[in-house]
Amino acid sequence: MAKQIEVAGLDAYYGSHKAIEGISMTIEPRSVTAFIGPSGCGKSTFLRTLNRMHEVIPGARVEGKVRLEEQDLYGADVDPVSVRRTIGMVFQRPNPFPTMSIFDNVAAGLRLNGRYSRSELEGIVEESLKGANLWNEVKDRLNKPGAGLSGGQQQRLCIARAIAVRPQVLLMDEPCSALDPISTLAIEDLISQLKLDYTIVIVTHNMQQAARVSDKTAFFNLAAQGQPGKLVEMDETSKIFTNPAEKATEDYITGRFG
Amino acid sequence: MTVHTGIHTRSAIKTRTGIQPISAARRAKDRLVQVLVYLAFALAVIPLLSLLWLVVKNGIGRFDMEFLTHSMRNIGARDAGGGAYHAIVGTLEQVLLASLIAVPIGLLTAVYLVEYGEGGRLSRTISFFVDVMTGVPSVVSGLFVLAFWILVLGMPFSGFAGALALSILMMPVVVRSAEEMLRLVPRELREASYALGVPKWRTIVKVVLPTAFTGIVTGVMLAVARVAGETAPLLLTVFITDSINVDPFDGPQMGLPLYVFDQAGRPTDTAINRAWTGALTLILIVMLLNLVARLITWWRSPARRR
């Protein structure tokens, strides 16, 4: 169910401000692609254009093409809601629904989209929680509120919630930046398991993390503050971290700026 | 920097680290402000407590089964007995009808302002007129319904006409409080829902409104409490009667505020005692409604299941 994403000449705007410019890349299925780069370079914005979450912000718009297996996601007759159902997302800060229990949180995407019997839901919830390595910790308190879990557990709950709707691609926007090292490790292990079934794209500020979990790495940068962010280069992770083609990438990775 | 031995500890601390003890002047100022705050609190509470005390003291005497189950039919100002059953029924019906009109409209307006308006011209215009409505004196809303509903359209005086007038007063309060509560729902929750492929309207119904539910209920209760005690608009729309009229759509009704107004204007002690008891009943009804609302929000809150 994992699918390939192809981006061609993509610009994204906030009102009149151009946040990213001219991005083209191919994201391979069943792999982890990491986006790195300094703050404000547009990597999160770019990530959000991949499942049409960018346009949720008032005044935000996108130009260019994003194709999922030949289908243009920004085509005139494409329903953004179904795009988001196909391309799931995990956010920087864990955001379980505060009014819902653990079970309801995982079932939310299914319940809010269609009719499922209780036993179907139970099966999918268990499978998703197991998929997110959270089942053993919460199986005895599925009807307790999701907000009562620890930060790391909440983030895994959000991952379970995202995979419960069986997306084909999973976008992760700095999923570990609010977590401690142990929870981070748990999420990273999870990412390596999930990539067997999903196409995963992860934005991270942590270069060790990018090196640990990703197959390909894309480095974004911006010429100056207020300028749009651009894709500097994208290659195999091992190559980016040992022998990048661009000087700017090397400077960033070795910590000479950014 | 010189550190003398034999200097007492205060200045010794000062010279070593630069950290100073709290000065006497600041302590005194702190005390003074504290006293002022407590004083202001007491001043605010005294009228409230004395009001409650007076109403309970004067009203408790007639607060009996007869008062709660009988109307004023065939009971003159001088006669003992009589009750406010007709007024209690009227108030409950009028406030319920007013809520049924004002709460959906107010809530939908707030949803539009927060979720769809996005600071556009229409939403700014609505916002402005909601503010204007907040400032409409209650008697004016009564006059409006009298002029439009009763005089122009030729409808009879009725509990429903009163409910229309009350709903005009309720609406801006509901809009403003619901708007505040909806704005408090974090953007991340909406995005989390969108990212699951949930359409915007379902996100609002299933995620945003439940999250803001407690606050919205509180706001609605404040609005109910505000209109339950209104007298002037009812006087012009519901009129006054001494008989029981359970049909809010036909003929004059009574309301507790009207009852208090009516009885207090009569020249005998028995009537004035009935007015006090009517006031006590009104306060109890509003308190009871608040209690019910609290129970609902408690029952719905995630803390209960933790």
Image (cartoon, helix red, strand yellow):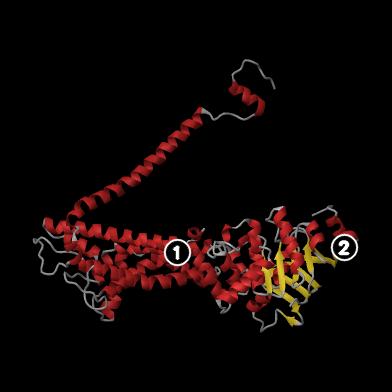
Q: Secondary structure at mark 2?
A: helix
Q: Position of residue B298 (x, y in %)?
A: 44, 60
Name the quadrant containing residue A156: bottom right
Q: Relative to residue A162, is residue B274 depicted above or below?
A: above
Check the residue under mark 2 and report the chain it is in.
A
Q: Position of residue A239 (x, y in %)?
A: 89, 63
Which disc, if any, is residue B216? 1
Between B84 and B150, the one lying in front of the other is: B84
Q: Position of residue A180 (x, y in %)?
A: 69, 53
Q: Which residue is mark 2?
A: A238
Query: Residue at the spot x=56%, y=79% of the render?
Result: A115
Amino acid type, label 1: Ile
The reply to whether residue B120 is in sight is no
Name the quadrant containing residue A58: bottom right
Q: Position of residue A216 (x, y in %)?
A: 83, 67
Residue B210 vs residue B240: left or right?
right
Query: Residue at the spot x=77%, y=82% of the render?
Result: A70
Residue B11 vs residue A37: left or right?
left
Between A114 and A4, the one lying in front of the other is: A114
Between A210 and B58, the one lying in front of the other is: A210
